[in-house]
Every structure is written in structure tokens, then in C-alpha cells.
Image: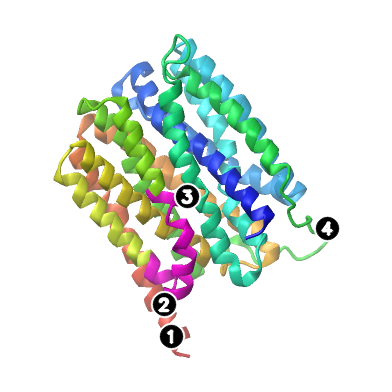
Amino acid sequence: MNRNLWLMVAAQGLFLTNNVVFVAVNGLVGLSLAPYNWMATLPIMGYVVGGALSTGPVAWTQSRWGRKVSFQIGLAVAFFSALLGAYAVITANFWLLVTATVIAGYYSANGQLYRFAAAELAKPEYRERAVSMVLAGGIAGGVFGPNLAKWTQHLGDAPFAGAYATLALVALVSMAVVSQVRFPPVPPKVKGADGGRPLAVIMRQPVFIVSTAAAALGYGVMNLLMAASPIAMKMCEHPFNDVALVLEWHIIGMFAPGFFTGNLIRRFGVIQIMSAGVVLNLLCIAIALAGVDVMHFVVSMFVLGVGWNFLFTAGTALSLKAYRPEERDKVQGAINFWVFAMMMISSFASGALVTTQGWTLLNYGSLIPVALTGIAVLWYVLQDRPRRAA
């Protein structure tokens, strides 16, 4: 760890504060403002759609101006979108709230690159640990985010308007933090220089397929269950303080393992850690199906967070082997696009299933992406076996 990495840890914590507050309140505000209950998670889906649409522009700004400028542009967008979200809640305008979250997705697309930036700030032999440690910074968001939503839910006349307004201040603090990071200089663009292999060729590699599947499907399962949990708890008549507690432990589960996941990957290998992530997802679903008491939600969401951490960290570490330095921006953009695409599908399915079919059927449905993740990992092992034997 060095000064730059610690600053990125702080930036990750602030980024997750934004994300957690969005998850904690968007579904509930959406449920109160939406014309139909099944549209409750559209504000959450808007955040993901905005992120997916922004992966291309963000990759271009990263390539054109470098990490720092691109990250600061994302934070400026976060500041504006948070204020717009607060205004939408005050005026009870559901579609303006969805618009605000779509715009905020640009910040999310930038924040998803913090982990790749961390790898570039460390020596090659410590990249897995750097990625893991920066992701661990999200634990600050896990503790601060739910409590921020709880403390600000009644700030002002409209419920949760204060939570959105406070996120504008969080964006300003993050801008100050990122301004202190010294990123590697942007390589000069040489006219006619080779930009590496075509993206279609890179995406056909087994290492790209399985690393992206682990990150995208792992995020999809996590988002499917996490986005629905506040609504499911409200339907079970649990108070918002309990919702905040569940989200707090979920985010701790997501990011506390970051302090040691990198070491586990170096000791046991990415495939073993991915496999453990799949098993933990199955355990989460089993606990969620066992009951709807607060402790069932707390434990299942905590286990879900740990499973996500294993899949996402191992997937990111493996993806570093899928591209050359000159291919970095386009490949990272492609990986994040698939992550956002899966999150977009799961965000919509989450609200639609939990409000029409219930929490139980939602959990059974989440077995599909978990199974697909396990199949992808097994397929990669079979594909990679001849190379290892050689």
C-alpha cells in the first residue's frame, strides 16, 4: 500500500456511500411515487442503465484525458444528479427521479474503474492485493451509507429528499480526495500506432469470458436480491431502521473480505475463490428461503455480500490477463458494459418479481444466474487444463 492507494480506498468508500444510499432509498421512494408498484425499482434500474450507456464515453475520456480528469468529470455529474434527485423527490416527480438516476450512472461507470486504477498504482506482483484492498474501502460506504440514509430520511418536508441532497456533499468530498491522487501519466498518442487486437478477438478468449461472467453474473445475483430486500422487508412490515441494518451488514460482507481476498487469491488461485463465491451465493439463497425474520435478511444478505466479493475480486484479477496495455481502456469498458447490462436486467426483474410474485419466488429465480456462473467456471477449468498440462 502507498499514499495513492490509500486515497483510492477513500474514494471507493465515498463511491459506495453513494451507491448504498441509492439502493436504500431509491426503491422505497420509487414505491411511493411510481404509478404502479412493479415500477418501484425503475430508479435503481435507471442508475444501472445510465452506467451501461456511459461505459463508452467514460472509456473515451479515460483514454483521452487520463484517470484523474475522467474521475473528476464523473464526480461533477454525481454532484449535479444528486441535487436533481432531491428536487425530484421534493416535487414528487417520479420520472424526473428516474432521469436523475440515469444521469448519475455516468458517475457509476467511472467509479467501477477505481479497481482497475488501483492495479496500476501498485507493483505487478501486488496487483491482486491492491484491487482487493481498494474494494475493501467500500466497507466505509457500508457503514456510513445506510446510516446516512437513516439520519437524513426526515431532513426536509419530503421523505429522503435530504438523503439525495447530502450525496452532493459526498461528491464534493470525493473530488477533493481524487485531486490528491497521482496517477501514471497518460501515454502520448502516436499517429498510426497499433491499438492492439480487435475487441471481438479479445472477447472470444476463455479468460475474458469467465472473468467477465464472474463479475457480471455475480453482480447480477447480488443486485437482484439486494435491490429487492428493502421492498420485501417493507412488505413484511419491518421498519426502515431494520432495512438500514440489513444493508449495513450486506455492504460489510461485500467489502470487509477485501482485506484478505487478495491473499486468498494468491494462495489458492482465482478459480478456487470464484467457486467459493458460487457456493456462498447458494448458501445465501437457502438462508433467505428459510424465513423472513430480520435475522434471516441480515445473515442472507451478509453471505451474499461475501459471495459477491469473491466473484468480483477474482474476476477482476483474472481479467488483467485478458488484455495488453494498449488494449486497456476498450477492454475495461467492455467488461463494465456487461456488468451494467446484467445489473440492468436484474434491477428490473427485482422490482417486478418481488412486488408481483414475492420474495420466495425471487430467490428461486436467482438460482439461474448462480448456476450459469458455476457452469462458466467449470468450462474455463476444462478449457485451461491442456495449457496447464503443457
The residue lying toward the viewer, choosing from 215 and 139, is 139
Q: Residue 263: tell me if it is visible.
A: yes
Residue at (68, 65) in percent of width and height: 325
Badge 4 crowding class, 10 Å Cα cut-off, few under 14, some 14 to 19, many 20 or more, is: few
Q: Residue 310: percent from the left, percent from the top?
A: 41, 60
- The residue at the far left in this view is 290
Cα distance in 3D space between marks 3 and 4: 30 Å
Q: Residues within 10 Å of mark 3 (few under 14, many from 20)?
A: many
Question: Is 256 in the magenta?
Answer: yes
The residue at which mark 2 appears reads as: 383
| Residue that mark 3 sits on | 339
Q: What residue did someone put label 4 on?
A: 188
What residue is shown at x 35% (from left), y 26% (from top)? 40
Q: Position of residue 61 (x, y in %)?
A: 71, 45
In screen coordinates, is 198 left or right of 25? Answer: right
Residue at image coords 48%, 37%: 19
Please, what secondary structure does the residue beneath circle 2 have? Answer: helix
Magenta stretch in the rendered image? 253-273
Report the front residue among 289 and 174.
174
Q: Nearer the viewer, mark 3 or mark 2?
A: 3
Mark number for residue 386?
1
Front label number (2 vs 4): 4
Name the element at disc 1. helix
Amino acid carrying label 1: it is Pro
- Proximity of marks 2 and 1: CB atoms separated by less than 8 Å: yes
Circle 3: residue type = Val
User: Looking at the image, which residue is at 44% across and 69% down?
Assistant: 264
